[in-house]
Image (spheres, rainbow, N blue to C red):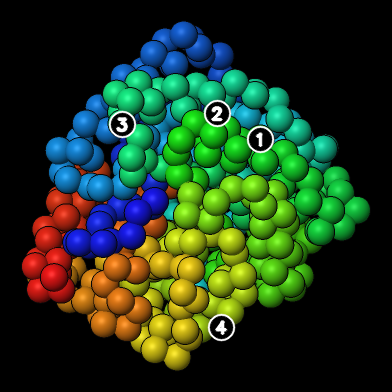
């Protein structure tokens, strides 16, 4: 991934709205209904081509395949790995305080299937990442500059899917790292940047999953980053982007842990690019954290300047102002503008309407242009 050497580059967090017919196929996958595999793969291939073209049309610099073939940014492990079964209940402290809005915040909850680990975590469909890479490569037409593929982190797997198999939480994280490492390396070896999705880094303080063995969020975060660093020790840091998130459900988020409380541990990652939220009302003020925390010389920031939990489209001037705040603190070259999180992190779970999502991405690009004109 490149630095913003002569203008502010733009990106997003990976997941983009899925076509309705593809979403229905993925619902069938979630519900373990028989599907026409050939038709499913052909539809994913076609949809990835369409979403790549649309990102290019909007003008996004660092693009993804939209994660269109996955049932979710994290629970795609159901599609690719063994050891998972059943369904666990997600819990959030902010929603416990406001039970009246749970239905609005989470919808039916059915798309967000969080399985339980009741056996060893091992690769089941080793060709899945190959198909993902092939579809994305075909859509790109050979030009992979600025292209990235997201993947879940071992820490988030251990946070999201309760451990009913391994003796300790640490053993679970290590096993998840071993299972995910081939996927990580396949993505990087194919020439793509790798986004490491780790919402647990921030969510583990105010969220939990029923039956989890996670008891110390700080120790969990530190362990997750340590095993991730070990698994990726042979990957250049500039190929890695580490995404921190407080959850993109439409809750009040008043129980979110502050960035300043976790940033020292987050900065232990080998990833060159640290990706943080900076647009939504609970975290927009945290640009100021970087006044007190010195960003290491070998790191850069991807900053969320678009809120994915509302249909309200940010004015490009506001986007530019948000970008400029960061540029003034850490330097313009080390700022890449993005969205707070994904627009469709789970199939059927869209906190922002797809039509508004694309308008927001266009505003992101225009805001980055305005900021660039003033910064250069």
Task: In the rendered view, tell whether residue 21 sits above or below residue 253.
Answer: above
**Of label 1 and label 4, which has the lower sequence position?**
1
Q: Is residue 56 left or right of residue 66?
A: left
Q: Nearer the viewer, residue 147 or 355?
A: 147
What is the crowding at mark 2: few (fewer than 14 residues within 10 Å), some, or many (at least 20)? some
| Residue 367 coordinates in the image, percent (x, y) | 14, 63
Query: Which residue does the numbered mark 1 point to in the structure image?
Result: 182
Q: From the viewer's perspective, is the residue at label 2 or at label 4 nearer?
A: 2
Measured Cα–Cα span from mark 2 to mark 3: 19 Å
- Report the disc number at residue 261: 4
What is the crowding at mark 4: few (fewer than 14 residues within 10 Å), some, or many (at least 20)? few
Measuring 10% from the left and 73% from the top, which residue is drawn there? 374
Quarter of the image holding residue 333? bottom left
Measured Cα–Cα span from mark 1 to mark 2: 9 Å
Query: Which residue does the numbered mark 3 point to in the structure image?
Result: 143
Task: In the rendered view, tell whether residue 189 sits above or below residue 290.
Answer: above
Measuring 35% from the left and 35% from the top, which residue is drawn there? 144
Secondary structure, mark 2, is: helix
Query: Which residue does the numbered mark 2 point to in the structure image?
Result: 129
Secondary structure, mark 4, is: helix
Q: Is residue 152 visible?
A: yes
Secondary structure, mark 3, is: loop
Q: Nearer the viewer, residue 183 or 21?
A: 183
Measured Cα–Cα span from mark 1 to mark 4: 32 Å
Measuring 71% from the left and 30% from the top, which residue is drawn there? 123
Q: Is residue 256 left or right of residue 117?
A: left
């Amino acid at each position: 991934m490149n630095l913003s050497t002569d203008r502010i580059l733009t990106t997003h967090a990976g997941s983009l709205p899925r076509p309705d017919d593809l979403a229905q196929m993925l619902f069938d996958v979630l519900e373990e209904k028989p599907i026409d595999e050939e038709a499913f793969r052909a539809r994913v291939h076609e949809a990835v081509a369409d979403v790549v073209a649309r990102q290019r049309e909007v003008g996004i610099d660092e693009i993804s395949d939209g994660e269109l073939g996955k049932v979710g940014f994290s629970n795609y492990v159901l599609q690719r790995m063994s050891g998972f079964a059943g369904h666990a209940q997600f819990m959030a402290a902010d929603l416990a305080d406001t039970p009246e809005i749970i239905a609005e915040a989470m919808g039916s909850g059915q798309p967000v299937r969080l399985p339980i680990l009741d056996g060893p975590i091992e690769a089941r469909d080793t060709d899945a990442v190959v198909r993902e890479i092939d579809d994305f490569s075909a859509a790109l037409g050979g030009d992979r500059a600025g292209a990235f593929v997201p993947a879940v982190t071992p820490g988030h797997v251990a946070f999201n899917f309760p451990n009913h198999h391994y003796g300790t939480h640490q053993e679970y994280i290590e096993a998840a790292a071993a299972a995910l490492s081939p996927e990580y390396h396949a993505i990087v070896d194919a020439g793509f940047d790798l986004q490491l999705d780790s919402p647990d880094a921030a969510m583990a303080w105010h969220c939990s999953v029923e039956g989890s063995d996670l008891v110390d969020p700080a120790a969990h975060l530190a362990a997750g980053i340590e095993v991730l660093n070990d698994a990726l020790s042979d990957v250049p840091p500039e190929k890695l982007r580490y995404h921190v998130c407080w959850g993109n459900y439409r809750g009040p988020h008043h129980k979110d842990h502050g960035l300043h409380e976790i940033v020292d541990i987050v900065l232990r990652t080998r990833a060159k690019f640290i990706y943080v939220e900076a647009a939504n009302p609970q975290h927009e003020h945290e640009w100021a954290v970087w006044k007190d925390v010195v960003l290491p010389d070998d790191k850069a920031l991807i900053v969320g300047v678009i809120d994915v939990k509302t249909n309200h489209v940010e004015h490009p001037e506001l986007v530019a102002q948000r970008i400029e705040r960061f540029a003034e603190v850490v330097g313009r070259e080390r700022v890449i503008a993005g969205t707070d999180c994904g627009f469709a992190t789970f199939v059927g779970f869209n906190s922002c309407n797809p039509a508004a999502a694309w308008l927001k991405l266009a505003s992101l690009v225009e805001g980055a242009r305005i900021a660039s004109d003033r910064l250069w």
